Amino acid sequence: MSTARVAATLAAEELLRSLAARHGPLMFHQSGGCCDGSSPMCYPVGMFRTGPGDVLLGALDIDGIDPVEVYMSRAQFEYWKYTHLTIDVVDGRGAGFSLEVPEGKRFLTRSRMLTDDELVDLGLVPQGR
C-alpha cells in the first residue's frame, strides 16, 4: 500500500488544469492561518520558495498537467501529520495571493483522520498495533 497524504476533488483538478494552461507548472503551500485563513495557496512553481522549514506532503497527479506538489510548514505538519488532506474549490473570493482569486473561486482544504492501515503504511504507528 502506498498512502497519499493529499488528494484533490474533480472540481479542484479542473480549475488546476485551467490555471496551469495560463501560468505553467503549479504548487501549493498550505497556509498556517494568518490573513489567508489556513487556505491552500496555489502558486506558479518558483514563485513561492520552500525551504528546510517546509514538508512536502506529496504531489497531485492530474491528467494533462505536471504534478502539483503540496507543501506545509514543518511546525504545522506536527499538528496535521495524522490527517489526510483533500484540496477542493468553492465559489467565493479568498484572501491572499493564490492564483484562483481572480476566478471568483477559492481553494480550501478538507481533512479526515488517517485510517489505521494508512498510519501503519506511513510509519506513524508500528505494524500489528
Image (cartoon, rainbow, N blue to C red):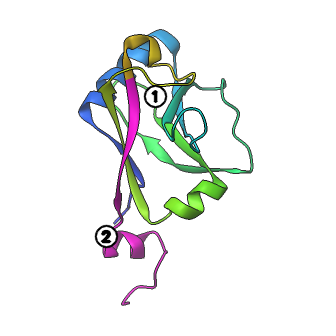
| Pointer 2 with pointer 1, Cβ within 8 A | no
Based on the picture, tell me whether residue 61 belongs to the magenta stretch: no
Circle 1 sits in a helix, a strand or a loop, which is it? loop
The quadrant of the rendering that contains the N terminus is bottom left
Front one among 6 and 73: 73
Q: Is residue 34 above or below residue 78?
A: above
Circle 2 sits in a helix, a strand or a loop, which is it? loop
Q: Amino acid at mark 2?
A: Thr
Residue 7 visible? The answer is yes
The residue sitting at 39% across, 36% down in the picture is 108
Residue holding disc 2:
115
Expressed as whole percent of the image width and height from the top left, the position of residue 56 reads: 57, 49
Expressed as whole percent of the image width and height from the top left, the position of residue 2 reads: 38, 62
Expressed as whole percent of the image width and height from the top left, the position of residue 16 reads: 39, 24
The residue sitting at 41% across, 25% down in the picture is 65
Span highlighted in magenta in the image: 106-129
Residue holding disc 1:
66
The residue sitting at 31% across, 70% down in the picture is 115
Q: Is residue 69 above or below residue 14?
A: below
Q: Is residue 63 above or below residue 20?
A: below
Q: Earlier in the sequence, mark 2 or mark 1?
A: 1
